[in-house]
Amino acid sequence: MSRETVTSGTEWESYVGYSRAMAVDGHVHVSGTTAVDDDGDVVGETPYEQTRAALDIVEGALGEVGAELADVVRTRMYVTDIDDYDEVGRAHGEVFGDVRPAATMVEVNRLVDDDLCVEVEATAVVPD
């Protein structure tokens, strides 16, 4: 079994015991990703901006293990207000276009920071 870890270097990864992404035998699992920069500051004020920022981080994690957005087969979007579905969905659609991964969007009570309104997970399969 091949196993490669992607880390963002935040203190939370070692404290909580997770990785930004894990690649195992051609499958890449990207952890829940929010619009937070390297300094821990929230990027974007609107659900659209936060979704785009989170998906940029997802794309970067995929790239570290040789995957790309075109390899994504599944996304999960957690939103703090389901009424934001249009903005979040528009950002997701712009990023993935014809890739059209299987996707889920659900409302959650809150995220780790009250200024965050969306968190995104992704799963990719890299062709041999």
Image: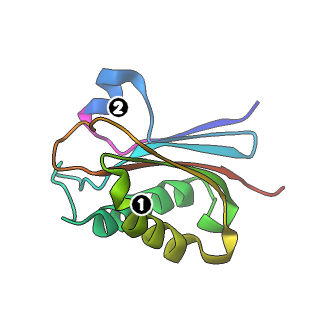
The disc at residue 114 is none
Q: Which residue is mark 2?
A: 13
Name the residue nearer the viewer: 13 or 117: 117
Q: Which tag, 2 or 1, sits closer to the chain's start?
A: 2
Residue shown at the point (18%, 48%) measured from the top left = 40
Q: Is residue 67 above or below residue 14?
A: below
Neighbor class of circle 2 (other Cα within 10 Å; few <14, some 14-19, many 20+) is few
Residue shown at the point (84%, 55%) measured from the top left = 128
Residue shown at the point (43%, 29%) measured from the top left = 18
Q: Majority secondary structure of the magenta segment? A: loop
Q: Residue furthest front?
A: 83
Q: Say what secondary structure mark 1 lies in.
A: helix
Does the stretch in magenta take in 8?
A: yes
Q: Is residue 31 above or below residue 44?
A: above
Q: Where is residue 78 shown, x and y percent of the image? A: 41, 45
**The N terminus is located in which quarter?**
top right
Mark 1 belongs to which amino acid? Tyr
Query: What's drawn in magenta, residue-wise?
Result: 7-11
Q: Which residue is mark 1?
A: 85
Does the stretch in magenta take in 82?
A: no
Neighbor class of circle 1 (other Cα within 10 Å; few <14, some 14-19, many 20+) is some
Report the Cα–Cα distance between label 2 and label 1. Answer: 29 Å
Q: Residue furthest right?
A: 128
Indicate the quadrant where residue 90 lies: bottom left
Q: Say what secondary structure mark 2 lies in.
A: helix
Q: Where is residue 92 shown, x and y percent of the image? A: 49, 67
Indicate the quadrant where residue 112 lies: top left
